[in-house]
Image (cartoon, helix red, strand yellow):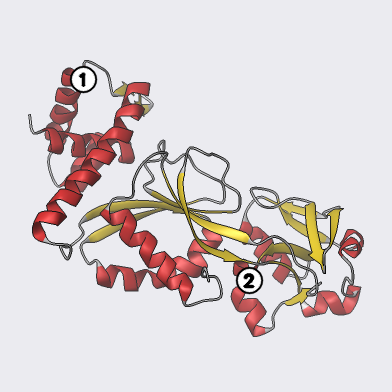
Amino acid sequence: MDLINAMRSFVRVYETGSFSAAAKDLKTGQPSVSKAVGQLEEKLNAKLFLRSTRGLAATDAGRRFYEHATRTLDEADLALRAVHGESATLTGRLRVSGTITFMRQHIIPKLPIFFAEHPRLEIDLLLDDGNVGLIEEGVEVALRMGKLASSGLTARKIGQCRRVVVGTPDYFAQHGSPQQPEDLVDHSTIIFSRGEGGEHLGFSKAGHSRNIVLRPRLRISALEGVRAAVLAGLGIAVVSEWIFTDELDDGLLREALTDWTMPLLDLWAVLPGGRHAGPKSKAFIAFVESQLQTTRYGIR
């Protein structure tokens, strides 16, 4: 049995959730993929997948083996690159997760540059405003914002941005602009109800701090919904600046409480727990970081 190729077959089945999809990705027949996974199970004396009429699911042993298999394949890729030189072309697929709005506005438009640098590399983007399970979803790199919930993740801070109080000029013309943080309580406010959203806010100015609790008129579980609501003039939102970069620059939205500050929102490149970044992951993280350095969101 070719152990490396068998592991590649297993990893693709794990990440695609299908033997046929894995075979298509690997440009081979489904019987070959099934045989490779079966041989692995035999060698390990453990079931890696449960097969049922509802589909394919990894066992506990399969989830544990996936973590080690991906690490081993990354090391194998590094060894091959060392033999062929650092300029060896990156190939294969990289699975990346991130929030819908941030990726749509700040990463996807830049991908032509990345693909031009790595023409044989493919990317699977998993977009979700929540924090998906990295191992369960086969994610190799996640771009996450704010405080990291798990200390078991391998993470590197690659960007940050301000939190801002925003609304349309028409909204402020009709309802006035808040002068103090507590004035927000009397406004129609829109909050992102997941992650770094919420009604509890902390402001500071000249060594003084204020903590307030909003009474939101509208709670939305997706940032695209928050964008639509604010742009429709439904109220004020307290959000990360990069959600509304273009609208703030173009004057479609205005900031309020500009003499007050809130804690910065950090952007992290996150790897599954304990894993070192492989060549593909390193290339993608370096690309995102370099793109952010050309904006006001880079680490200075």
Earlier in the chain: of badge 2 and badge 1, it is 1
Tell me which residue sits at (15%, 34%) in the image: 6
In the rendered structure, the answer to whether residue 146 lies left or right of residue 44 reads right
Viewer-nearest residue: 55 or 142: 142
Mark 1, Cα crowd under 10 Å, few <14 / some 14-19 / many 20+, is: few
Where 184 sits versus 39, above or below? below
The quadrant of the image that shows the N terminus is top left
Where 19 sits versus 157, above or below? above
Residue at the far top in the pictured view? 45
Q: How many marks?
A: 2
In the rendered structure, the answer to whether residue 67 lies left or right of residue 176 reads left
In the rendered structure, the answer to whether residue 182 lies left or right of residue 165 reads right
> What residue is pinned by disc 2?
244
Residue at the far front in the pictured view? 207
Where 212 sits versus 14, above or below? below
Q: Amino acid at mark 1?
A: Leu
Q: Position of residue 260 (x, y in %)?
A: 80, 69
Tell me which residue sits at (37%, 22%) in the image: 60
Q: Position of residue 275 (x, y in %)?
A: 36, 42
Residue at the far left in the pictured view? 1
Provide the secondary structure element on which disc 1 rests: helix
Q: Position of residue 180 (x, y in %)?
A: 89, 68
* Residue 93 tag number: none
